[in-house]
Image: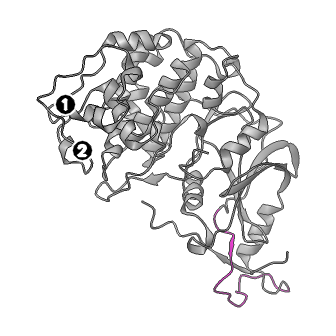
Amino acid sequence: MVISPVLSPKPNPPGPGARPPTMKSKPLAILNSSNVQPPTAASTPGDTGRDMAEQMNDEVRKQFKTGAKLGEGTYAIVYSGHYKSDPSSLVAIKKIKVNQDYKDGIAMDAIREIKFLSELDHPNIIKLHAVFSTKDQNISLVLEHLPLGDIETLWKTHSISYSPADIKAWANMLAQAVWFCHENYVLHRDIKGNNLLIAADGTVKLADFGLARSFADPGRPMTYNVITRFYRPPELLLGARHYGGGVDVWSMGVVIAELAIREWFLPSNTDFEQLVAIYDVFGTPTEDSWPGVSQFEFYTPPDDSSVPAPANGTGPSHRATSPSQSTQSSIKRPQPLTYWRQRFPLLGEDGIDLIRGMLTLDPRKRLSAREVLEHRYWTNAPRPTKKEDLPRQGSGEEKMGEDLKRRGGEVESGRVDKVARKLDFGAMR
């Protein structure tokens, strides 16, 4: 287990209310409606047609009691629940709907979520307790109960006030989660405020791994059509197919910026407008500022003969409103330090230096997740607020249900079979 370079959070020690142990059979006992086979030697004598995997699935399912429905979407239904052995041990049960348009009826998003949450165990990543299938062939993910809403709802609720130390605490928990993912060669690829859920004790947890993938093979091309647009880095908007942890670091920088200003930092309606929004703040990329940028599929060279736009510090109000007015036709300069100081006073000099390092256009010059945690921002005053002292907002279970029901990347009878199958974790890109 790798140890975080700074401010590593430690799990709370087991106590009287410790969660009952669960079986380590998460993705093994999922039922399939095809390839029916005779009972195997592993079947229990006298229990015709019940193989070991099916018995394990039943044992896992029987550990939990499903409660009220919290939310429903086209992808999943979310219920409250608890361990039958301890009703005080609450969980969220995410029931993935069967869809015949997908291989084996299961969306790739669900397979990704099961795979990566099974592998990642960290205090700032939502915990997957178990996976089981139901009689109607749906798969249920038993997830950690996170009843205090999400980071986006928090900054939108202006009746709640918070301080620079609070922002530092929330940002550090996010940075810990991203660092841990990257140390284990996992890209999240959809970091945003409403994928950062808040536990009852104030801990921030990174959720929704439906777009995650491994980046252990740097030579394998990946899709650029990931990450919710407001949080998507410029290299993906320009069509990059080879990238690394820098895409998550950019998203993380935008989340921290939004916490500081309590509004969208880089909003847009289209991918084109998103690039314009980025260029307004960070300047137009050229071969001088970002070597190799002209090789991207969607890169449009600026008109060097145009007069550069002034860095006047006014930000989005001077954004282009149509392609004919686009900053693509001229070179814009990055906003000066005074812009950052005026817009981000809650971050202070250290925090501004940190997010500027995270939001560097050239991903090769962008801070890595480890470098983020090694930044002086975390150790200089003010110290991060303790999680139990952080401001709370009462979104309740309904908000948790709304957050968990989405699929990755989304902005908002009797037994059928007796044969167990394994999920196909290949073909993820």
Q: Is residue 107 above or below residue 254?
A: below
Q: Closer to the camera: disc 2 or disc 1? A: 2
Count neighbours of disc 1 (C-alpha within 10 A) and say few if under 14, some if 14 to 19, many if 20 or more: few
Horizontally, is 120 left or right of 146 in the view?
left
Q: Residue at x 67, y 19 (%)?
A: 390
Q: Is residue 316 found inside the magenta-colored segment of the image?
A: no
Q: Earlier in the sequence, mark 2 or mark 1?
A: 1
Q: Is 278 above or below relative to 159?
A: below
Residue at 88%, 52% (x, y): give it. Answer: 84
Q: Is residue 366 left or right of residue 262?
A: left
Q: Position of residue 311 (x, y in %)?
A: 28, 16
- Say the numbered circle drawn on residue 299: 2
> Where does the image place residue 66, in percent across and percent down from the top left?
84, 54
Q: Is residue 143 left or right of residue 228?
A: right
Q: Please name the predominant secondary structure of the magenta segment in the image.
A: loop
285 above or below 185?
A: above
Residue 289 circle label: 1
Query: Percent position (x, y) of residue 143?
Result: 70, 49
Quadrant in which the C terminus appears:
bottom left
Q: Is residue 31 magenta?
A: yes
Residue range in magenta is 27-46
Above or below, comparing residue 80 to residue 221 in the picture: above
